[in-house]
Image (cartoon, grey):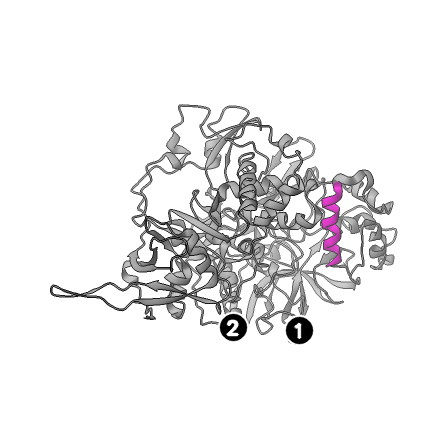
């Protein structure tokens, strides 16, 4: 047999390759056919567009709520107890909220897409590719068969995927893309969003194993998956299929045998790969996980994991991390911004560093995805820079500064500028994406890429660092007083913190980034946490309910440094700043950044930080006037936002009351708009009445407007 030779794809007809697995018994040799076919998305043809969740909510009777499943289907819940696919008002047309019941034109191609772990590229097996006979007039001449090298893991999977009595058509990346053709790889990687989303279903191959263990595990997963109907922002909704009190079920005990069988599945290598994140989330609701001959719906598996996560006090400690890791995969990213997706998946391994971007590209909003060009010939550093600049230009923000900086010496992209994130490894950031803080208000970045390694931004220098504490040696909260003593605040002794309260309170609020009940309702209060800390409680005693919160805070502090500023403020950073580094509030960046001035007067990025008292726009807008206070809460898309409460009247608003006293420039007017995933976290639309220009930031926060009000904003260059 000779080696199979690929025929180039015809890009003019949007062709892809498909693999037909020819029928055979389990131990028969692997025989496949490779064909070309055009993949064209179905046309909408003017079908009814589904209403938004906000519009559906307005049609509901009292005590009813509309929610979306993790797959995007709308269901209705009554008082948190009963769920239904049907609107409680039968007069509301079903096609307005349920796309499953609409006449949906399907793509012409009928195929499944395989998601699997490629494994070692050195362990090659052979798949036979029968050649079609050559016809010369009435004479039929048999041609020589060909073979195609495939990895051992794929050779193991195909006998389980193959049918005995009929062919099976699949898209398998390692076969359907000519891996030696760099241009084709770049083109097809960009099309994977279509390939996986237009497949009839995705089949995730997990490998083989003990059939008895697999059967028990899949039976348990099927059961758990029917208990709750999680949404992107809420875990414990009762399932439409399982009308049982979900909270009561979540407290039932799981024995070690159950955990052992389920973890036997969850520990599979497939769950660790980066590429599988977009592959499984782009698939249809019929997508499955397959282990040996056994299968379970992906939709039920992800619900099962979420259900088990709610039982974390029953999870053995050695297994708890695996469940937590799977949560990130199972919740999905349909509402996430691209920078959050990049960060959430950055700890997953892949062979090529730039695949940390390309392997997730089809999960990005379409407005971002189509602007990023897949190019395997460019360096990793150039790829990461392209992503930064593309997102910055599209959003008019520099939100990816959060992930940048020189915080450790093991970076693989040390030749790249400090303002470009190094996605080859998980960035050690201080403030996680979507925390809800907004240090620069709804401001645009006005960033300018002035040379290959230089970026101009606008911002204000808040203060310089006066002292940096050594990294804390902390076992539990009883060690906090020692960490506090490492920051010499003696010159401020007896004085209140700049925004009020004592320095001891300010230090504690900084350690937990102020994510206390006073800021995030439902979290522990400052008084409760302070009591545990200041009494130097070893263990948690009667504070067991605080355990997860405290453990997370302790682990974060172990990796962080506390610092004080010349103006009396205190902060924390994942990294190691130096005395005289400056804390900047950069327009279009949601969190403060620590920068280091170079001899040439330019700045290197050290990293993002938390500084108590400037996280809610105080540096550009001043303090909130009484009686207003700010809290953080999620919106319907699970995006955490600042929300403002009038303590006297109880009124609440998503609009910043500090802007009420600042007139909008006469040439600008606010606009109504429908937010999308491609919009910045904090966004508001304004239109210029004279030119028609539309912007996604507040003109009252233009650099020139801030300077006019006495805010010392200046242009600086990042290198």
Q: Is residue 176 left or right of residue 585?
A: left
| Residues at discs 1 and 2 in contact (Cβ within 8 Å) | no
Residue 205 on image: x %, y %? 48, 52
Q: Quadrant of residue 255 in the image?
A: top right
Say which residue appears at 69% left-offset and 50% top-offset.
318
Residue 90 on image: x %, y %? 41, 23
Residue 213 visible in image: yes
Q: Secondary structure at mark 1?
A: loop
Q: Secondary structure at mark 2?
A: loop
**Front position in the image: 254 or 348:** 254
Q: List the residue tagged with mark 1.
A: 598
Q: Nearer the viewer, mark 1 or mark 2?
A: 2
Residue 7 on image: x %, y %? 30, 67
The overriding secondary structure of the stretch rendered in magenta is: helix
Q: Which residues are magenta?
A: 546-560
Q: Residues within 10 Å of mark 1 (few under 14, many from 20)?
A: few
Chain-order first, disc 1 or disc 2:
2
Q: List the residue tagged with mark 2.
A: 452
Q: Is residue 171 left or right of residue 456?
A: left
Residue 695 visible in image: no
Q: Is 554 contained in the magenta span? A: yes
């Amino acid at each position: 047999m000779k080696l199979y030779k690929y025929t180039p794809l015809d890009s003019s007809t949007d062709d892809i390759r498909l693999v037909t697995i020819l029928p055979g018994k389990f131990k028969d040799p692997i025989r496949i056919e490779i064909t070309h076919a055009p993949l064209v998305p179905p046309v909408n043809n003017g079908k009814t567009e589904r209403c938004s969740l906000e519009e559906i909510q307005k049609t509901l009777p009292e005590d009813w709520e509309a929610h979306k499943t993790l797959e995007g289907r709308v269901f209705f819940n009554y008082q948190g107890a009963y769920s239904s696919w049907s609107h409680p008002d039968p007069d509301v047309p079903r096609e307005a909220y349920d796309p499953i019941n609409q006449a949906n034109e399907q793509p012409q191609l009928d195929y499944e897409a395989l998601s699997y772990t490629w494994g070692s590229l050195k362990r090659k097996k052979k798949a036979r590719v029968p050649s079609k006979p050559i016809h010369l007039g009435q004479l039929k001449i048999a041609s020589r068969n060909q073979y195609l090298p495939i990895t051992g893991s794929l050779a193991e999977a195909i006998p389980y995927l193959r049918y005995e009595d009929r062919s099976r058509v699949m898209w398998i990346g390692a076969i359907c893309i000519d891996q030696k053709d760099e241009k084709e790889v770049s083109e097809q990687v960009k099309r994977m969003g279509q390939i996986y989303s237009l497949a009839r279903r995705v089949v995730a191959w997990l490998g083989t194993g003990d059939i008895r263990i697999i059967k028990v595990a899949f039976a348990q997963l099927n059961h758990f998956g029917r208990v709750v109907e999680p949404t992107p922002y809420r875990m414990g909704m009762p399932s439409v299929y399982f009308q049982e009190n979900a909270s009561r079920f979540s407290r039932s005990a799981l024995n070690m045998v159950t955990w052992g069988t389920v973890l036997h599945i969850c520990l599979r290598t497939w769950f660790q790969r980066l590429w599988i994140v977009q592959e499984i989330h782009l698939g249809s609701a019929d997508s499955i996980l397959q282990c040996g001959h056994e299968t379970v719906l992906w939709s039920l598996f992800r619900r099962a994991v979420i259900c088990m996560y709610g039982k974390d006090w029953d999870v053995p400690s050695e297994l708890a991390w695996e469940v937590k890791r799977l949560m990130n995969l199972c919740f999905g990213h349909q509402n996430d911004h691209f920078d959050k997706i990049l960060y959430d998946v950055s700890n997953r391994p892949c062979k090529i560093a730039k695949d940390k971007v390309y392997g997730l590209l089809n999960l990005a909003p379409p407005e971002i995805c189509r602007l990023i060009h897949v190019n395997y010939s460019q360096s990793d550093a150039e790829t990461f820079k392209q992503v930064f600049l593309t997102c910055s230009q599209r959003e008019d923000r520099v939100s990816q500064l959060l992930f940048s900086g020189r915080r450790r010496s093991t970076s693989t992209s040390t030749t790249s500028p400090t303002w470009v994130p190094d996605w080859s490894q998980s960035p050690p950031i201080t403030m996680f994406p979507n925390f809800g803080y907004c240090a620069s208000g709804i401001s645009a970045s006005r960033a300018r890429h002035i040379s290959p390694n230089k970026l101009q931004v606008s911002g204000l220098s808040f203060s310089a660092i006066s002292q940096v504490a050594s990294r804390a040696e902390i076992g539990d909260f009883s060690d906090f007083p020692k960490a506090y003593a490492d920051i010499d605040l003696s010159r401020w002794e007896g004085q209140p913190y700049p925004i009020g309260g004592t320095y001891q309170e300010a230090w504690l609020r900084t350690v937990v980034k102020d994510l206390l009940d006073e800021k995030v309702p439902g979290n522990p209060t400052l008084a409760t946490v302070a009591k545990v800390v200041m009494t130097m409680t070893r263990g948690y005693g009667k504070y067991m309910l605080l355990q997860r919160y405290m453990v997370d805070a302790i682990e974060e502090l172990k990796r962080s440094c506390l610092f004080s500023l010349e103006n009396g403020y205190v902060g924390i950073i994942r990294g190691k700043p130096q005395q005289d580094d400056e804390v900047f509030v950069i327009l279009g960046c949601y969190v403060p950044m620590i920068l280091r001035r170079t001899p040439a007067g330019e700045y290197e990025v050290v990293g993002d930080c938390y500084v108590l008292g400037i996280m809610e726009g105080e540096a550009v807008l001043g303090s909130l006037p009484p009686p207003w206070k700010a809290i953080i809460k999620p919106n319907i898309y699970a995006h955490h936002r600042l929300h403002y409460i009038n303590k006297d009247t109880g009124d609440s608003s998503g609009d910043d009351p500090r802007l009420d006293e600042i007139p909008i420039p006469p040439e600008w007017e606010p606009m109504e708009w429908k937010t999308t995933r491609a919009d910045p976290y904090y966004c508001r639309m304004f239109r210029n009445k004279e030119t028609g220009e539309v912007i996604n930031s507040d003109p009252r926060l233009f650099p020139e407007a801030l300077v006019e009000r006495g805010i010392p904003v200046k242009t600086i260059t990042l290198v």
